[in-house]
Amino acid sequence: MTETTGRRPTGLVLPTYRPDGDRTHPPLLSPEYGSTVLRAPSRPLVLLPQRLTEVTGPLLGAERLGPLDHDLTRQHDGEPIGQRIIVHGRVRDGDGRPVPDTLVEIWQPNAAGRYRHAVDNWPAPLDPNFTGVGRALTDADGRYRFVTIAPGAYPWRNHLNAWRPAHIHFSLFGRAFTQRLVTQMYFPGDPLFFQDPIFNSIPDRQARQRLVSRYDHTVSEPEWALGFEFDIVLRGRDSTPFEDGDDDDD
């Protein structure tokens, strides 16, 4: 298949995407979220058209994954502290079709709400048996699955008595490293939603709820782990809200 530009065929057809909802994603400048005041662009954005690097590049194949990358509870000699959970879901495009062979990465704090990171030094204990990072590839039906520990809330100094709701960060790669989407998964019924400017920076209430996972009793394993389902839609009116990059509250 070729694409015709004027009278000359280019030989390359670049993908097109369904437009997202106008109020799905948070604005780059959300004054209640203090970090955006410093990093939001002050000039109009420049549209960069897709070129060859956006549709080709390093392939993120199964050989890049370790046997325990998907199970954050078995990456060390001992067991981590906290409630085991199973997080699973599907990655779909704007037409509802599954997206296979997508690299899904997660990172999160431990059960006490602390990241294994040099700049995270609030007085919560580190867990020597929990690093808090994992990755998996979606299967032919766009499904992924992680075993991990329920993350704890933590303070982050955005405003007086500010606490982040419990969450897990998700990163999805496309066909090249320039195709990356970052989002967060929250848990149902969290009492901290009301004061979290990151969650509430998403204008549309229904879009915010697409970041909240669903408890899945059919996936919960007896006397072992609770199950949570989190589906991710990449484009269209039902798109999962995405960030402009890694949020720097962590």
Image (spheres, rainbow, N blue to C red):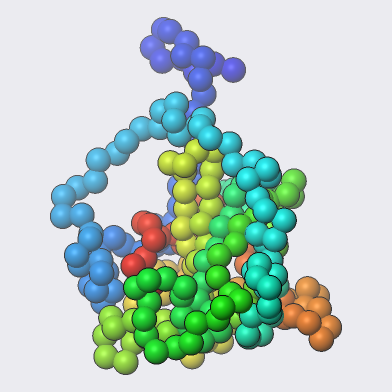
Q: Nearer the viewer, residue 15 or 226?
A: 226
The residue sitting at the front extreme is 77
Compared with residue 142, is residue 166 higher up or lower down, i.e. above or below?
below
Please tell me which residue is depicted at 46% across the width and 80% down the height of the picture. 114
Tell me if 134 is positioned left or right of 160 in this view: right
Number of residue marks: 0
- Please state, as top left, top right, bottom left or bottom right, where the C terminus lies in the image: bottom left
In the image shown, does 87 or 15 lie closer to the viewer?
87
Q: Is residue 9 above or below residue 106?
A: above
**Residue at 66%, 67% in the rendered image:** 75
Q: Position of residue 196 (x, y in %)?
A: 38, 81
Can you give x and y, in whole percent of width and height, for residue 171 in the image?
51, 57
For the N terminus, the quadrant is top right
Q: Residue at x 53, y 47 (%)?
A: 173
Residue 117, x across and y down, in percent: 42, 71
Q: Residue furthest left?
A: 42
- Is 79 left or right of 165, judged from the image as shown? right
User: Residue 159 lies in what quarter of the image?
Assistant: bottom left
Q: Please provide percent x and percent y for residue 237.
A: 50, 55
Question: In the rendered image, is residue 244 in sight?
Answer: yes
Instruction: Say if residue 212 shows up in the picture.
Output: no
Residue sitting at the far top: 7
Q: Is residue 40 above or below residue 213?
A: above
Q: Residue at 53%, 52% (x, y): give it.
A: 172
